[in-house]
Image (cartoon, grey):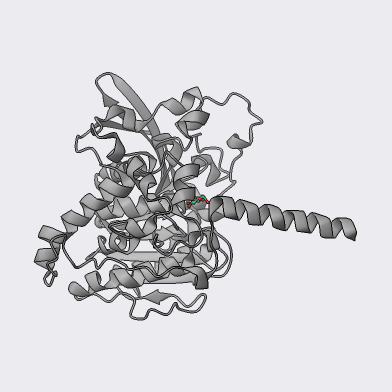
Amino acid sequence: MKTAILVSLLFTVAITSSAKRRNINYDESKIAPYTLPDPLICNDGTKVTTTEQWERVRRPELLKLFEEHIYGETPKGKLNVHYKVVAKKSDALNGKATAQQVMFTFSHKGQKHKALALVHYPNNRKERVPVFIGYNFKGNHCTTTDEWVRYSPYFEGITDLSSKLLQRGTQVERWPMEEIIERGYAVVTMCYHDIYPDVTPRKAQPRDLVRLSNLLPVTEDESSRWQAIGVWAYGLSRIADWVELQPWADREKFCVIGHSRQGKAALWAGVQDKRFKVVISNNSGCGGAALSKRVIGENVEFITRQFPHWFCKNFTKYSMRERDLPLDQHELLALVAPRHLYVASASLDRWADPKGEYLATYHASPVFELYGMKGMTSAEMPEIEQPIMNDVGYHIRQGKHNITLYDWRNYLDFCDKIFNKRGDK
Ligand code: GCU
């Protein structure tokens, strides 16, 4: 009994001290007063009252602020990309889909980089279909147990066949392919490590050194140079380039989706690339959909120290100084307008600050309203599992940090509504 108490005490002390070390606050009442910048006020103080003004003046200003302070600059240059369908089967997912594996070979001045997309599109389709585009975390082989699916190039260097990294189907539940197909959508995924291996330079293995970004010219100013999130976002657009060429894909109906760190990348991709008509952030948290100025759950100090390779160096300057940020994440969400945004949180995901994710969606809404669209109308969060599906969507799911079937079903319902698919079948 005594030992149990001691252990639990030590555990509490350990948690408290590590929380202190990381300066993590989880208490709403301890949030210091903060002011959010108004997305509709230009740098020179002018109030935006028309969509024309938003698009000509304010939108570019905000994009520049996000490049400069958070994600870094996206190089403008185009890369050569060669696409090759390396495998195809027309009876995937119990005959419901055609599956393809497509090798992307990026090249520049003799240097090459490879990434492998896994594609499923419905066989039973009368017309072109909407497409979800999103990264997986653990390789294309994590999305299925089907041995037909090849290992993503990032994993090719692994020779130890018993390695956990080569285990198939470890994240099947995150990719309900069959249901997505049955609902009339295509889905294209790729391993995010193929585009930018998610390892700090300190921990890099030789195979990690091959990065898509090595092929692109970077800005001279190191402090606003793009890093992983910028490169992942760029990669999502390169996937969209290929999807655009496909006869089964409806170019007006691309949805970019990402969970957690990939939610951050999906937002940044969706903001920059207007081909994404629906932008979905699943539990993206700090540096994603959550407001930074609340400083609750993960904060800038923690994220930039733990993941120094995600954001541009300038972001680090706001560590313990979130209030000095000249912008906040609601303005990122606002940049999706007049396209459609869906933000989702999970009730136990305190690290990602569900309330901050909701409030950012709410405070982004005036920009959607400028276009006559309906965003979040109340500063009060909805109840758990009571999704709001206006022109902007939001839900908070019961449970932990994850992307589940419940989340996907809501995204499908939202997209059905946006694309007018209800009652189509
Ligand atoms: C960590 C990180 C988060 C991130 C998450 C994930 O928890 O601190 O910012 O969203 O990993 O990607 O799973």
Q: Is residue 124 visible?
A: no
Tell me if 374 is positioned left or right of 198 in this view.
left
Name the residue at 45% across, 35% down. 197
Q: How many marks?
A: 0
Residue at the far top: name it.
Answer: 110
Q: Position of residue 339 (x, y in %)?
A: 25, 64
Q: Position of residue 156 (x, y in %)?
A: 51, 27
Reply above or below: 268 against 392. Answer: above
Reply above or below: 197 against 348. Answer: above
Q: Position of residue 285 (x, y in %)?
A: 45, 58
Name the residue at 29% across, 34% down. 222
Q: Split into 4 quadrants, where in the image is the C terminus?
A: bottom left
Tell me if 378 is positioned left or right of 283 in this view.
left
Tell me if 163 is positioned left or right of 89 in this view.
right
Residue at the far right: name it.
Answer: 1
Reply above or below: 126 against 114. Answer: below
Name the residue at 62% across, 51% down. 18
Name the residue at 47% across, 68% down. 31
Reply above or below: 10 against 384. Answer: above
Q: Splitting the image into 4 quarters, where does residue 113 fall?
A: top left
- Frontmost residue, 253 versus 129: 253
Q: Position of residue 370 (x, y in %)?
A: 18, 73
